[in-house]
Amino acid sequence: MTPPARRPPFAVLAPAGLGVAIVIVPIVGLLQRTPWSSLLNRLGSDTVVEAIRVSLAVSVVAAALSLVLGLPLAWLLARHDGRLVGLVRAAVLVPMVLPPVVGGTALLFALGRRGLVGQWLDAWFGVTLPFTTAGAIVAATFVALPFFVTTVEAALRQAGTELEEAAAVAGARPVTRLLTVTIPASRDAIMAGVALAWARALGEFGATITFAGNLAGRTRTLPLEIFLALESDPASAVAVSVLLLGVSLAVLVALRGRWFTR
Amino acid sequence: MSLRIDGTLQRGDLTLELDFDLPFGITAITGPNGAGKSSILRLVAGLEALDAGRLTLDGVVLDDRAAEVFIPAEERNVSIAFQQPRLFPHLTVLQNIAYPLRRQGHAPAEATELARPFAERVRATSLLDLRPRRLSGGQAQRTAIAVAMAVGASTILLDEPLTSIDEAGTADIRRLLHQLDTPRVVWVTHDPADAHDADHQIILGSR
């Protein structure tokens, strides 16, 4: 039998408690300043509604792009080994640790009108990305993609090749195996990846403001709206912050089956 | 018409020197753990490749590194039931059995109709709408055997199909395996009685 439980030592409890406080106190601070009675009015104002519209469009398209581009990428990374694969994996993960403003600067010099690729986009297709909604989507995808890829790659790796082998023997070609077995059998992980990518895209600030600017109705997403409102209308900034906090908590709750039980 | 392996397979420290025919009828492969019994089945199925030599099935070269020939698993006239049944978790029992039929080009409704007789053969008709996680070990293995039958291959490979099943269910499946109408059955087993009942026997040595 295990000995009776003892209180963990103070040397452990104290830093652990401080760790919890550093997360909880700001949230309590935010909620305590929230203008609850006028919350809906503030969230319904023209500028906020416009930012919600931009944010939804940008984050949903970025999550969809993360899915479409990230799924084949995650499969390649999960099923192949070697130095090149290792390098690709590291490269894809860079946006997770890179300061977003650096990402935005990099995007500007790559995809800006005079950028490495941007000059050709402009010359050949007449496409300009900086300071457009499309640019905001590119910035959001840049930061969100790694969240999808790491989640799904880990799941595919853990699932192994057993079912794909069974499908092959049953007569399924590689792409058919992917579509009829691998993807449906990993549906939960793929949904979790989309949710994480979407949440990250929704909160994106640094890369967006650097690359896509802060244009109302085009690139001014909710985080940019908060930043702007802090100067002129702090109560609105708090209201929008609470909205984003609620969305984040909802994503966490939706994912709880994956992370809180395992 | 024969299935012939003449070559070597490298598995870590182990080098398997293979030189034998797998004739029509039931061939039992026995041998100690780690002797490479499963590897031979994976080789025939196209899930592993010879390091040297060649594998031919009914006159067709399936695997010959020197000649740069390797026919992938999905194009081989071979099916397999794994030691741990590998059923697709998102599909029902009937859909699992219909899966190879779908790959043969049958429309969904047609494939499920064609799958029913296979389900009857393995006495799984009461399980048709269940997902694999609801099945017992024996039920899952019976379903997996039905899937292997539905592939319609002339060779069925069985990798210790009775080990994941409790004792009570084995007689049932054993009878089923002896009644397969597939021309060539290759059965990896550690049970001397099963090996004895087979038409042919291959005993792998351990070195």
Image (cartoon, rainbow, N blue to C red):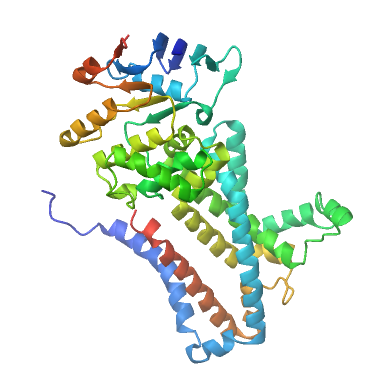
Which residue is found at the position 46% from the left and 13% from the top? B1
> Residue A8 placed where, x, y %?
24, 57
Residue B142 visible in the snapshot: yes
Q: Does residue A16 appear left or right of residue A232 in this picture?
A: left
> Looking at the image, which is closer to me, A218 or B162?
B162
Q: Does residue B190 appear left or right of residue B85 in this picture?
A: left
In the rendered view, would you say B49 is above or below A154? above
> Residue B119 placed where, x, y %?
33, 42
Residue A224 visible in the snapshot: no
Q: Does residue B105 appear left or right of residue B141 in this picture?
A: right
In the rendered view, would you say B9 is above or below A19? above
> Looking at the image, which is closer to me, B196 or A117?
B196
Which residue is found at the position 59% from the left and 60% from the top? A63
As drawn, the residue found furthest toward the right would be: A123
Q: Does residue A240 appear left or right of residue A124 in this picture?
A: left
Which residue is found at the position 54% from the left and 32% from the top? A81
Q: Quadrant of residue A20?
A: bottom left
> Residue B107 placed where, x, y %?
51, 47
Q: How many numbered dots are placed on residues in this image?
A: 0
In the rendered view, would you say A33 is above or below B12? below
In the rendered view, would you say A111 is above or below B12? below
As drawn, the residue found furthest toward the bottom would be: A37
> Residue A235 placed where, x, y %?
57, 86
